[in-house]
Image (tube, helix red, strand yellow):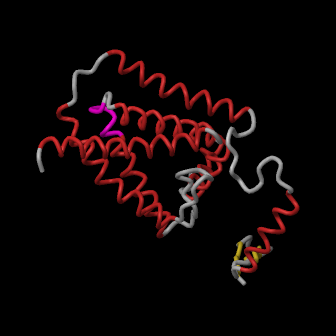
Amino acid sequence: MSPRLKSISFVVLRWLLGALFIFSGAVKCVDPVGTSLYVDKYLAAYGMEFMLPASLTLAVALSVVEFALGVMLVVGYLRRYVAPVVFVLVALFSVVTLLSATVLPIGDCGCFGSVIMLEPWMSLLKNLCLLPVAWLVWRGVKDESKVERWHFAILGAATALPLVVSLYAAAHLPLVDVSPYREGTALRDAVVAEQSMLVDEGRCVLIFEDMATGEVVESET
């Protein structure tokens, strides 16, 4: 591969990875409360219930970090610092989704909020595809130009924007609500429709609690 083609390929991969991080962070920051529900699931699955009161803070922090890293990848500034952080995050996400797909019944990963629903195996496949891309982006920072002070100003702006949006959405309604029970929905009709769909798909689940032991048993009919 010629040096020019190699350079173009690196830029394309960096843009694609950055755009994905921007999208992931954006869909989380417009509905931080919804994102915090996914965080609750992970904390409970890992036996970290003591951190549940901080789930909203963690959700906001995750959205801000993902959005800011994505912006810096796209604009190409501070790559020597951003690229390794992105690789570590993708590797961490890969481990988490692997556990979710095998030993921890978490369900939808919440990677893209409620906008795109991914089952654990699909989420794991996504992360495994992104892992070599993140590695190549990290390896390609050797020729990075000199770091300027205003690069950090761009990073500050990319951090402030999702933070402000998250705080506003947390104090009010989500800026973009794609949940099935969003404002304006006829709740009775939505619940009936969802129950009918589950029965039609053969996914009706009965939950029993043993009054003596407290054990919860699920039975799918």
Q: Is residue 128 left or right of residue 96?
A: left
Q: Seen from this angle, which residue lies furthest bottom?
A: 221
The x and y percentages for residue 46 are: 53, 56
* Residue at (38, 50) in percent of width and height: 90
- Magenta part of the protein: which range? 79-85
Q: In this orientation, which residue lies closer to the viewer: 39 or 50?
A: 39
Q: In this orientation, which residue lies closer to the viewer: 23 or 211?
A: 23
The x and y percentages for residue 195 are: 79, 71
* Residue at (86, 56) in percent of width and height: 186
25 shown above or below 151: below
Quarter of the image for the C terminus: give it. Answer: bottom right
* Residue at (62, 39) in percent of width and height: 54
What secondary structure characterizes most of the magenta part?
helix
User: Does residue 7 show up magenta in the picture?
Assistant: no
The x and y percentages for residue 167 are: 65, 30
User: Does residue 81 show up magenta in the picture?
Assistant: yes
The x and y percentages for residue 183 are: 80, 47
Q: In this orientation, which residue lies closer to the viewer: 51 or 87?
A: 87
* Residue at (42, 18) in percent of width and height: 153
Quadrant location of residue 117?
bottom right
